[in-house]
Image (spheres, rainbow, N blue to C red):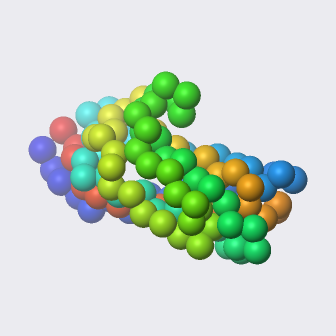
Amino acid sequence: MRQLALNAKAYATLDANGNGTASTGPLSPGEQWTGVTAHVSVATNNAEAICKVFAGADPTSGNFGDATTWGSTGDTTSNLPDVRVGCNVFAIWTGGDPGAQATLAVTGTKVVA
């Protein structure tokens, strides 16, 4: 098995209510993300968004990682399980600045069989 540094990003543009979702996950067969840390932020923080982070097949049935009231200014969580193909890391922002770009940055180790 090969172990590589994981640096993945996903983006969302917050809607008229300041809400948005970004997700990213492994795509190649046999790929797994371990030691996952998720960092969330938004380009502006006039209205500080709340952000919830999940890992799993979808955010409604995924493993809840963490929530932060610093979803715009920026916050990090490593309270996430390993992520396999078919699953993602999800960041869900609410109450941020409408039209602002939100970023989910995921780091850790990419294990490839």
Q: Could you say where residue 62 lies in the image, as x and y percent from the top left?
A: 45, 31
Residue 3 as seen in the image, left or right of residue 86: left
Residue 5 as seen in the image, left or right of residue 43: left
Q: Could you say where residue 6 lies in the image, as x and y percent from the top left?
A: 32, 59
Q: Which residue occupies 26% across, 34% down?
A: 30
Front residue of 66/87: it is 66
Front residue of 53/105: it is 53
Q: Is residue 22 above or below residue 31?
A: below
Q: Quadrant of the N terminus?
A: top left
Q: Which residue occupies 74% across, 50% down?
A: 19
Q: Which quarter of the figure has residue 38?
A: bottom left
Q: Which residue occupies 70% across, 51% down?
A: 94
Q: Which residue occupies 34% across, 45% down?
A: 80
Q: Can residue 7 be seen?
A: yes
Q: Quadrant of the C terminus?
A: top left
Give the farthest residue toward the right: 16
Give the farthest residue toward the front: 69
Q: Is residue 91 above or below residue 76?
A: above
Give the farthest residue toward the top: 61
Front residue of 24/73: it is 73
